[in-house]
Amino acid sequence: MKLTKRMLSVILTLAMLFTLSTAAMAAENDGPNGETVYSNSFEWQGRTYEEIKTSDGYYILEEYIDGIITERITVKMGEDEFLQEKFDGSQVNLMSATGNLPISSEVKYFSDYIVENAGAEQASAADEPVISRIPSNSYRIKDGDIGSVTYRALESTGYVFHSLDFTTGLLGLWGNDNFTVAAPGDATRSEMISLLQSGFEYHMSGDLASLILDIAEFMMGGFSESYYLTLGGTVYQYNVTGKSTDGRSQDFIGHEYFGRIKVDKAGNKYETSYEILFADCYPSFIEQKDVTVAMQYFNSFWYSPSWEVYTWY
């Protein structure tokens, strides 16, 4: 009986040591304790993603399926390691006595995935694009008035018209001439989003990264095998302001990417021409007639169960 107790004590001690070592990454930096300075939510391939940045330098990306968390990536921005937590994604675990706790936690390292990183160069709003090999006239920086949208909403008294005028300003741009990720075939979606963002100092939004991954997947026909993904381009971050006729205003952040996307899968190489990709509340949404962005602004000013974009101008 004494031997059994001693063996049980050893097993419990080892289990405690394993649990403590798994949490070491978060403990070293005390975890994210700052205020949220940026938040964004987007849908991708049947999943919902929520990302935040905190005032103490953390980036957190969470993946949800049917409203239940399935994965979380926590990064201390600028450092090599990140914490990956996975959840079983079931209602059973959510309703358990312990709550929806991760079923696995693993500290990983960006340096295990990143093959080449030219280093993200930052420029202020007044500077030229930082990627010198891209002609300066190939991408037009947006500034000032970008247009207006008129909405038609159906209310109990009939149709009501609302208008918003939009302006934009460049917050900054971050370029990387040669950022290459060696992606294993079993890399999760959240891992890949975070890896791409790291090459642009987390100024690439998650939905912009997911759009790049969609293009890469289309070029090579799926993510079932290991591959190399290279980006050479610039992320432009904008503030886009909508203002109503009664003087109210609402600001949202938008991102645009201009550059190339290259994929190497088992020696088969694919490459796009220079692409302009849009995400979030990007300043080109009026010329693109993007109803999703227009809807976000409408909902921040008014409520109506039935509405439509009446004119873009």
Image: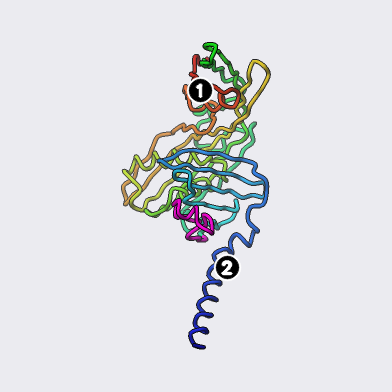
Q: Residue furthest top?
A: 158
Q: Identity of the amino acid at label 1?
A: Pro
- Residue 91 highlighted magenta (yes or no): yes
- Residue 53 at x, y percent in the picture: 61, 45
Q: Secondary structure at mark 2?
A: helix
**Which residue occupies 50% across, 57% down?**
96
Residue 246 pos. (x, y %): 67, 16
| Label ID, residue 161 | none
Left or right relative to 83: residue 224: left
* Residue type at tag 2: Leu
Mark 1 or mark 2, whichever is nearer to me: 1
From the image, tell me which residue sits under label 2. 20
Residue nearest the viewer, comparing 177 with 144:
144
Q: From the viewer's perspective, is residue 295 above or below residue 77? A: above
Q: CA distance from mark 1 to mark 2?
A: 51 Å
- Badge 1: how crowded within 10 Å, few (<14), some, or many (20+)? few
- Pick whichever of labels 1 and 2 is earlier in the sequence: 2
Q: How many marks?
A: 2
Magenta stretch containing residue 177, yes or no?
no
Residue under the image location 40 percent in, 34 percent down: 273
Specify start and end residues of the magenta stretch as a single range: 85-107
| Residue 172 versus residue 230 in the image, above or below | above
- Front position in the image: 290 or 144: 290
* Vertical comparison of 84 with 53: above or below: below
Q: Which residue is mark 1?
A: 305
Q: At 52% across and 11% down in the image, what residue appears?
A: 158
